[in-house]
Image: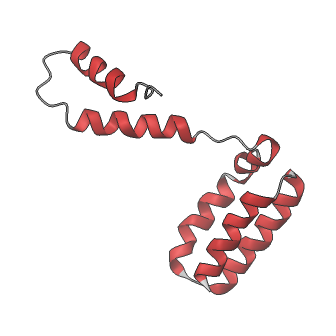
Amino acid sequence: MCHELKELFRLLFDTLTDRDEAKSALQTWMQQVEALGVKAFKPFLVTLNNWLEQILNYFLEGWTNAFAEGINNKIKLIKRRAFGYTNFDHLRLHILVECAPNPT
């Protein structure tokens, strides 16, 4: 049942384009998950409920901040390997090289 709920959640974001319709569908989905009673879903439901209005903004234009989150993650990984860099400029150059667009 958990897999079906996960796939339904993905389907909502792939198919719905109206914010009000999405809100209703997500609230129905959350009720189904709560009725299932799986403890592992509880933190996700709390987060989804707390950020519901902001998440619903996705259905206005279909934009996400995934690119920015990817860059932030890459920078965090570089920082973890950055021990021994003599100054900030070396770290900055490494980030610029790693995050440069690939030539096509």
Residue at 33%, 37% in the rendered image: 76
Give percent across and percent down for residue 33: 67, 78
Residue 82 horizontal side relative to residue 72, left or right: left
Residue at 22%, 17% in the rendered image: 90
Q: Residue furthest front?
A: 104
Q: Is residue 13 above or below residue 25?
A: above
Total tally of numbered discs in the picture: 0
The part of the image, by quadrant, that contains residue 3 is bottom right
Residue at 28%, 17% in the rendered image: 93
Give percent across and percent down for residue 52: 72, 54
Which quarter of the rendered picture does the N terminus lie within?
bottom right
Give percent across and percent down for residue 89: 25, 13
Q: Nearer the viewer, residue 19 or 52?
A: 19
Q: Is residue 6 above or below residue 74?
A: below
Residue 49 horizontal side relative to residue 44, left or right: right
Q: Is residue 23 above or below residue 5?
A: above
Residue at 20%, 36% in the rendered image: 81
Q: Nearer the viewer, residue 9 or 44?
A: 9
**Color style of the picture:** secondary structure
Give percent across and percent down for residue 61: 78, 40
Residue 92 horizontal side relative to residue 57, left or right: left
